[in-house]
Image (spheres, grey):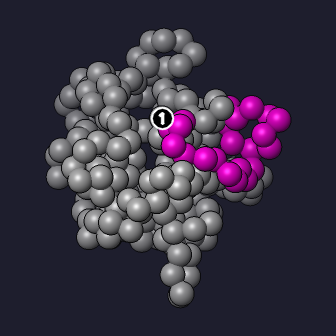
Amino acid sequence: MRTGDLIFSAIGHEDNAISAVTVGYRGARLNHMGVVAIASFGDFVLEAFYPEVKLTPFENFARRSRDDAGRERLMVGRLDESHTALIEPALNYGLALCEMPYDELYLTGNGALYCSELVVNMFRHANGGAPFFIEEPMSFRDIETGKPHPTWIEYYACFGMDVPEGAPGSNPGAISRDDRLEIYDITGPIPGLEQELL
């Protein structure tokens, strides 16, 4: 890995609510992501993970992705050479956001950040304020049924809200499909991923 690589993971079971409504690179059901930061004193991942934005030791990030059999489920991608100049300013900006609260509502512009929103904001800042990873209307509909996923209905009801279907946002799966990203390493049995890639 190199500093600036994007790392994606599958946390929990295959029917995770995020995985159930998004699709990543070659069908992968991914539900978390961060940015790799290699230092002389260790390998880290800059991430937004409850309760805040933080720099997490790589081993801890990887451990969270383990399935019931103890296998880590990770995917790593690298921006093409024409965009590597964005990495340093993106990381510097992201590090300045450490301790910002985690966004439990998955909404943009509310003073808190979720995992892919952190990455979107980092690279927007590095790109002079112009969008880099594009936010799209979010869908909370089950990929298999096309109906609103019941877990999301219950989740937002706890906050006294309707599901924010169509609100602008991002997710790890969509970012993993970006054409400017080369997926170069896949570890473990990531749910949904075409088996010939394992």
Q: Where 122 falls versus 171 (above or below)? A: below
142 or 160: nearer the viewer: 142
Residue 126 location, quadrant: bottom left
Furthest-right residue in view?
196
Residue 94 location, quadrant: bottom left
- Can residue 74 be seen by looking at this rendering? yes
Q: Where 175 falls versus 146 (above or below)? A: below
Are there few (<14), some (14-19), or many (20+) residues within 10 Å of tag 1? some
- Locate the C terminus by quadrant: top right
181 or 69: nearer the viewer: 181
Q: Identify the residue at image location x=48%, y=12%.
A: 146
Q: Position of residue 1 (x, y in %)?
A: 62, 66
The type of residue carrying mark 1 is Ala
Q: Identify the residue at image location x=21%, y=28%.
A: 161
Q: Which residue is mark 1?
A: 174
Q: Secondary structure at mark 1?
A: helix
Q: Position of residue 20 (x, y in %)?
A: 53, 28
Magenta stretch in the rendered image: 177-198
* Magenta run includes residue 106: no
Q: Position of residue 110 (x, y in %)?
A: 17, 46
Q: Identify the residue at image location x=56%, y=82%.
A: 42
Left or right: residue 151 versus residue 73 is left
Furthest-front residue in view?
82
